[in-house]
Image (cartoon, rainbow, N blue to C red):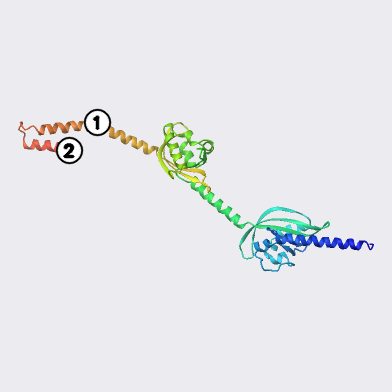
Amino acid sequence: GSVQDIPQGREQREALRSSEARLRLLIENTPVAVAMFDTDMRYIHTSRRWLEDHGLEGRDIIGRSHYEVFPEVGAVPRFVEIHERALRGDKFDLQEDCWTRADGNKEWTQWAILPWYEGAEVRGIVLFTETITARKQAEAALRTNEAMIRAAMDKAPIGKALVRPDGRFLRVNPALCRLLGYSEEELLAADFQRITHAEDLVADLANLRALLEGRITNYQKEKRYLHRDGRVIWVELSVSLVRRDDGEVDFFVSQIQDITHRKAVERIKDEFVSVVTQDVCVPLTVIRDSLQTISRMHDIEMPHAVRRLLEASGTSCERL
């Protein structure tokens, strides 16, 4: 080259050093976990978040191999292969992985990898990570809770339902479907108003308004539902209200127990009492009054044994 090429080459080197300095400053101060590696997977730059997330504060890892710092990563062939592919120019968008740390703890990480270049040549990779173990644990706990709630709903021997404020069913359990004769899909497409006996709907809605207005926290009542085949089902209904953290109404929790048999027994009992009143008590009253009248007849001489029989008969009538 000519003498004129020397200043130009110096400017390019200075520009490159300036660019590297800006990149180092950016990586070191970025709020996400970032590490920059050379082609031998040695650390070149790291962000503070990288050191914090991976428990490396106070350690000088620049120039050391990533697999030396994290032997457990180097022991996973899949991770090593991903790094090698990235060093050949492949890019890896956001992904999630679970791996076992050296201390035996499981850690979930969300990561992405980009190769970095000098000219057209790959000179290393940039690794972005975010530790999401807490989030994954929370998600697993939520799934467990949901599974428990679903099991509690599905295995319950009585009808259970979650109901929207407008009365539409949000979730129903098999016991309720069996009780009312509808499939789950049919109930989820309906509302409780449609299957409630017309004579019970006004009182039901009044109780729901009291719940919504905060005047009561729950209520229990006997009501009638209409079975899919048209017959009337008596139930004992218990309802409570669930609100979101902001105080807005989320849904109602309803428990529905079939009391049709109990109501039938009560009806038979009432009919029996009515029959006893009409067919037994009235004649007994006539007999009792007649015996009392005879007992008070002093102008008739009655043997002592007869009078004792009259008194015993009167006592029996009273007891009956």
Give the crowd class for mark 2: few <14, some 14-19, many >=20 residues within 10 Å.
few
Query: Residue 105 location in percent, x, y?
Result: 61, 62
117 left or right, relative to 148: right
- Residue under the image location 12 percent in, 37 percent down: 311
Q: Amino acid at mark 2?
A: Ser
Whether residue 85 is visible here, answered yes or no, is no
Q: Is residue 313 left or right of residue 2?
A: left
The quadrant in which the C terminus is found is: top left
- Mark carried by residue 316: 2
**Residue at horizontal 28 percent and vertical 32 percent from the top:** 274
Residue 132 location, quadrant:
bottom right
Near-viewer residue (252 or 142): 252
The residue positioned 75% from the left and 54% from the top of the image is 91
Location of residue 51 in the rendering, given as x and y in whole percent from the top left corner: 67, 64
* Horizontal arrangement in the rendering, residue 150 relative to residue 85 (left or right): left
- Quadrant occupied by the N terminus: bottom right
For the point 58% across and 56% down, the residue is 137
Residues under numbered marks 1 and 2 in contact, where contact means CB atoms less than 8 Å apart: no
Residue closest to the far right: 2
Residue nearest the observer in this picture, 125 or 267: 125
Q: Residue 64: x, y in percent?
A: 73, 67
In what element is the residue under mark 2? helix
Give the number of the disc on residue 279: 1
Mark 1 or mark 2, which has the lower sequence index?
Answer: 1
At label 1, counting other C-alpha atoms closer than 10 Å, the crowd grade (few under 14, some 14-19, many 20 or more) is few
Name the one closer to the observer, 170 or 279.
Answer: 170
Label 1: state its secondary structure. Answer: helix
Disc on res. 105: none
Q: CA distance from mark 1 to mark 2?
A: 17 Å
Q: Is residue 217 above or below residue 28?
A: above
Residue 304 can be seen, yes or no:
yes
